[in-house]
Amino acid sequence: MGQKLSASEIEQFAKDNPNTGFDTCKYCNGIEPQNDMLSFDDSDILICEECNDNKFKEIEDELDESIDEVFVTAHQLFETKSGDITPEQSERLDSLKKQIFDLMLEQVKQNL
């Protein structure tokens, strides 16, 4: 993946590569040489690597926070003595979070 280009870099790149165009990130409007950005299957939406990484991180953080809130609520409702989790439960939870995360990404991509 490329790196966002400054105005002077765009000008120089265009001079050095007259037959190559540029792409613009849908989210930050950063400009990179054509075909250096990520795309989503049949969509014409392009995203730079930095925005893609940031969005993945936001989704992961939101998922973690939401799941943590559900566990806190369950423990409050049942008035448990602690919220301890065993290593095996932690591994299962991590696996389920990954599956949910993958499902969310699949569903988002199909709707872009």
Image: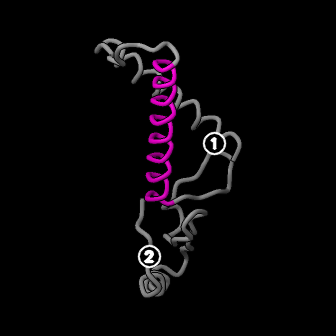
Residue 75 - label: none
Q: Where is mark 2, residue-wise?
A: 5
The residue range painted magenta reads 48-76
Image coordinates of residue 41 in percent, x first then y, are 63, 45
Q: Tag 2: residue type?
A: Leu
Residue 43 in the image: state x and y as whole percent: 68, 50
Q: What residue is drawn where x is 52% and y is 31%?
A: 102
Q: Which residue is mark 1?
A: 109
Label 2 CA crowd tier, 10 Å (few <14, some 14–19, many 20+) = some
Q: Quadrant of residue 104?
A: top right
Q: Residues within 10 Å of mark 1 (few under 14, many from 20)?
A: some
In front of the other: 81 or 93:
81
> Mainly helix, strand or loop, the magenta region?
helix
Vertical comparison of 38 with 26: above or below:
above
Point out the image quarter for the N terminus. bottom left
Secondary structure under the numbered disc 1 in the rendered image: helix
| Point 46% across, 18% down: residue | 75
In magenta segment, residue 111: no
Q: Is residue 81 left or right of residue 35?
A: left
Q: Is residue 3 above or below residue 77?
A: below
- Can you give x and y, in whole percent of width and height, for residue 9 in the image? 42, 82
Look at label 1 and name its amino acid.
Answer: Lys
Q: Earlier in the sequence, mark 1 or mark 2?
A: 2
Question: Quick check: 84 left or right of 13?
Answer: left
How many marks are shown on the rendered structure? 2
Residue 88, given in percent of the width and then of the height, sits at: 32, 12
Above-or-below relation of 27 to 75: below
Contact, mark 1 vs mark 2 (Cβ under 8 Å):
no
Q: Is residue 32 above or below residue 93?
A: below
